[in-house]
Amino acid sequence: MRSISLKAISLLLAGLLGSAGIPAFADDACLDFKWDASKERALFAETPASLTAGKSPSSAPPLVPGRLYALRLAAQDQVTFAAAPGKKVPVAGAYAGLAVLKIPADGSYRIAIDLPFWIDVVSNGC
């Protein structure tokens, strides 16, 4: 990851409804995706809402689908996770943060980020 990007990431939540949840081949061969990412690409072109990620579950900011966010992260050793991370704790100097997804309806959702990054999604402590 780029050093400036370690402290902030852009996060996009895109809701998929009906047949949009079925993977499709992207129009742009350069993307090498096996699904249509045109909605995500359009949202990444917008100005993100800047938020500070939470250091604990109680301080995690709410996020809603269909919006682009730039989350400011904290040093990982300052973050109390809602559940144990699914990946081994990275080396010293790693960053982390928490956010709460406000999902308005049942359905399939995907999360997109603009850098190589690890994201765990936790529901009801699991």
Image (spheres, grey):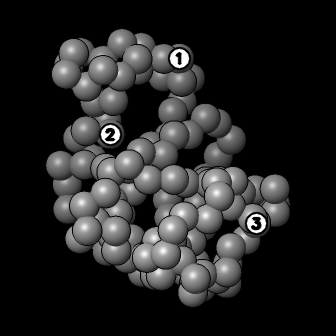
| The quadrant where residue 107 appears | top right
Q: Is residue 122 above or below residue 5?
A: above
Q: Which residue is mark 1?
A: 22
23 versus 8 height, above or below: above
In the visual, does 52 lie left or right of 84? Answer: left
Measuring 38% from the left and 48% from the top, which residue is drawn there? 116
Q: Horizontally, is 82 left or right of 66 in the view?
A: right
Give the camera-side residue of 14 and 122: 122
Front disc: 3 or 2:
3
The crowd level at tag 3 (other Cα within 10 Å; few <14, some 14-19, many 20+) is: some
Q: Nearer the viewer, residue 31 or 101?
A: 31
Are discs 1 and 2 less than 8 Å apart at CB?
no
Instruction: Pinpoint residue 55: horizontal percent, then vertical percent.
Output: 57, 83
Counting labels gives 3
Q: Residue at x 57, y 87 (%)?
A: 78
* Marks 3 & 2, CB-CB < 8 Å contact: no
Q: CA distance from mark 3 to mark 2?
A: 28 Å
Mark 3, residue position: 83
Determine crowd level at label 1: few under 14, some 14-19, many 20+ residues with C-alpha closer than 10 A. Answer: few
Quadrant containing the N terminus in the rendered view? bottom left
Q: State the residue at coordinates (51%, 33%).
A: 16
